[in-house]
Image: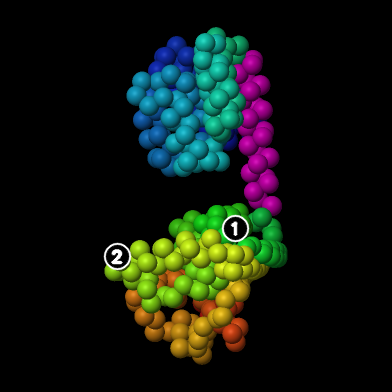
């Protein structure tokens, strides 16, 4: 019973008889229950700091529909399961919604014992999912190595995937993790554009014609096997105190020495648009290393609470 009491359920339905019935029944089982008669009120509750374990929503609601509410929850609180209430005539809609992220559905009229079983099943699955997430909180060391052809690498997707690992490890809070994701993306883009594609940074500026020229040359080289088939290697290594992110391209390299000081920090960087990547890295990353050739960069970041101890 103690575990059940910790679960908070949000019921969304404009039919007062339904909400009263479910509130009374679920409260009697030990759940903490709140109800809303439209999606807008439900969103208010969800954004008000309450930690819900489950949302049960009717498909047909005044204003935003239950399916729209499902979409919003999936986009903003993807760990929160949603059960749909639907009439038999809209069963196809419910099945379609399952494919869109709903955890389960309940058809009206419903049997309360069935409601209880579905809720228990969904919450049990959610509990297992959370236990799985906590595995990463106990991670001591992880090393991932990737090798892509230039044309096959999507910097945004890979950066997001690596950042999600740091999120599961609770390496930093979400706002800081978004900064890391941006750094990963910019570093990968630099490896692709200025490394493998050998695009001159001098033509990447605020001039519209020059920007168009840059993009035109970029697309042309992505179609040219000489550049598009070049390989780019990525190594991500993390532990309890820090992570390393290394990108090695197949380009000619560059003279990095004027950008890095003796403490492996980014020094005085040109603020032109083509210096954007270095500028971002310099503000977020603790240490930066290059190989002699200048076609491999390694970024080092210490866990924020250890930063003062590791960085002097």
Instruction: Left or right? Give the position of 271 relative to 304.
Output: left
- Vertical order, 40 against 215 (above or below): above
Q: Which residue is mark 1?
A: 152
Q: Is residue 88 magenta?
A: no
Real-space Cα separation, disc 2 to disc 1, in angstroms: 28 Å
| Residue at 43% over, 19% down | 60
Q: Residue 103 location, x and y as percent?
A: 59, 30
Return the disc, 2 or 1, that comes first in the chain's sequence: 1
Which one is in front, 271 or 35?
271
Crowding at mark 2 (Cα within 10 Å: few <14, some 14-19, many 20+): few
Does residue 50 sit above or below 22 in this rendering? Answer: below
Residue 144 seen anywhere in this rendered image of the structure: yes
Q: Which residue is mark 2?
A: 208
Above/below status of 133 relative to 110: below
The answer to whether residue 104 is left or right of residue 135 is: left
The range drawn in magenta is 113-135
């Amino acid at each position: 019973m103690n575990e059940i009491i910790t679960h908070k359920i949000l019921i969304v339905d404009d039919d007062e008889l339904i909400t009263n019935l479910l509130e009374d029944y679920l409260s009697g089982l030990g759940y903490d229950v709140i109800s809303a008669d439209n999606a807008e009120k439900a969103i208010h509750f969800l954004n008000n700091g309450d930690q819900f374990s489950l949302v049960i929503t009717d498909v047909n609601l005044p204003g935003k529909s239950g399916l729209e509410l499902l979409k919003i929850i999936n986009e903003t609180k993807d760990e929160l399961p949603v059960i749909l209430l639907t009439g038999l005539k809209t069963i196809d809609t419910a099945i379609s919604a399952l494919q869109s992220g709903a955890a389960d559905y309940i058809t009206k009229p419903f049997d309360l014992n069935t409601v209880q079983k579905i809720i228990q099943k969904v919450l049990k699955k959610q509990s297992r999912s959370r236990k799985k997430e906590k595995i990463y909180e106990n991670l001591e060391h992880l090393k991932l190595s990737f090798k892509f052809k230039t044309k096959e690498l999507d910097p945004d997707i890979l950066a997001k995937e690596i950042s999600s690992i740091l999120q599961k490890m609770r390496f930093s809070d979400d706002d800081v993790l978004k900064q890391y994701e941006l750094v990963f993306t910019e570093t990968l883009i630099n490896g692709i554009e200025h490394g493998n594609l050998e695009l001159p940074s001098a033509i990447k500026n605020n001039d519209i014609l020059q920007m168009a020229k840059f993009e035109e040359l970029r697309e042309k080289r992505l179609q040219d096997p000489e550049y598009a088939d070049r390989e780019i290697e990525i190594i991500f290594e993390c532990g309890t105190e820090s992570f390393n992110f290394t990108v090695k391209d197949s380009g000619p390299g560059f003279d990095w020495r004027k950008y890095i000081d003796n403490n492996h920090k980014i020094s005085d960087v040109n603020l032109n648009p083509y210096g954007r990547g270095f500028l971002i890295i310099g503000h977020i990353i603790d240490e930066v290393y290059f190989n002699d050739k200048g076609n491999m960069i390694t970024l080092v970041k210490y866990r924020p609470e250890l930063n003062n101890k590791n960085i002097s």
